[in-house]
Image: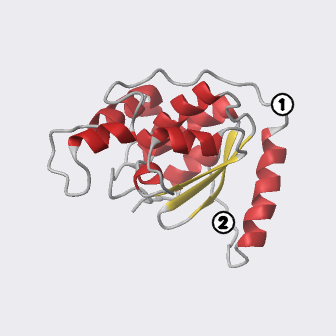
Amino acid sequence: MSSPQAHDPADLLARWWSEYTKTDEDDDLLTPDKRLAVTAPFGQTWPSPVLRRRPVIDAGEVAAQYARVFTEQRPQARLGLVAASGGAHALTALGWDGPANYDNDTAKFSAVVRDWEHRFGARVVAVGLNTLHLSVAAPPVETEDALRLAAEHFAFCPDNVWQGFPPYTLTAYAERIVGMSSWDFWWD
């Protein structure tokens, strides 16, 4: 595994986007037109990332609130402590391999989460075998920003859109994350 500092999050997201929006591959689930419809209005063109937002409430407070809700909904959840400078780095330090079916280098995902920590006040609240749960102190509140963030989420975890709730499009996903103070990711 590499180091999170060795990766530029914007480059990673753009590269993953390019990989997941290819239409020349054999896909038994989606035709090229349907694949492009999922990522409309961007298609195969990587949009610019959402600019940094200033949290209106403390990121630690939002994380604590989400942790309470998370553990109330999942009483089987257990506390884990990891010696790391922050949640993003903890993913790499503990050797988490949630997105292994997409990329075996967790440090790449840590780099993106670290970027979201800075831009949105995101905090790692929980991880599972193939899940990641973040609290968010400064979520997008405008539809346009949410759509660009949906593209980032798709590049980071395409299963959130491909296998999420119908309809399976960035636009539908963006509508769900406007103002959301938590982001949940699941890799198949």
| Residue 68: percent from left, percent from top | 81, 62
In the rendered image, the vertical position of residue 77 relative to residue 96, given as above or below? below
Along the line of sight, which residue is nearer the eye, 133 or 92?
133
Residue depicted at x 48% and y 55%: 166
Mark 1 and mark 2: Cα distance apart in space: 28 Å
Residue depicted at x 60% and y 33%: 146
Along the line of sight, which residue is nearer the eye, 151 or 86?
151
Residue depicted at x 22% and y 47%: 31
Residue depicted at x 76% and y 59%: 67
State whether residue 85 appears in this view.
Answer: no
Along the line of sight, which residue is nearer the eye, 91 or 49?
49
Which quarter of the rendering shows the C terminus?
bottom left
Left or right of residue 17: residue 125: right
- Can you tell which mark lies on residue 167? none
Q: Which residue is disc 2 drawn over? A: 80
| Residue 58: percent from left, percent from top | 84, 37
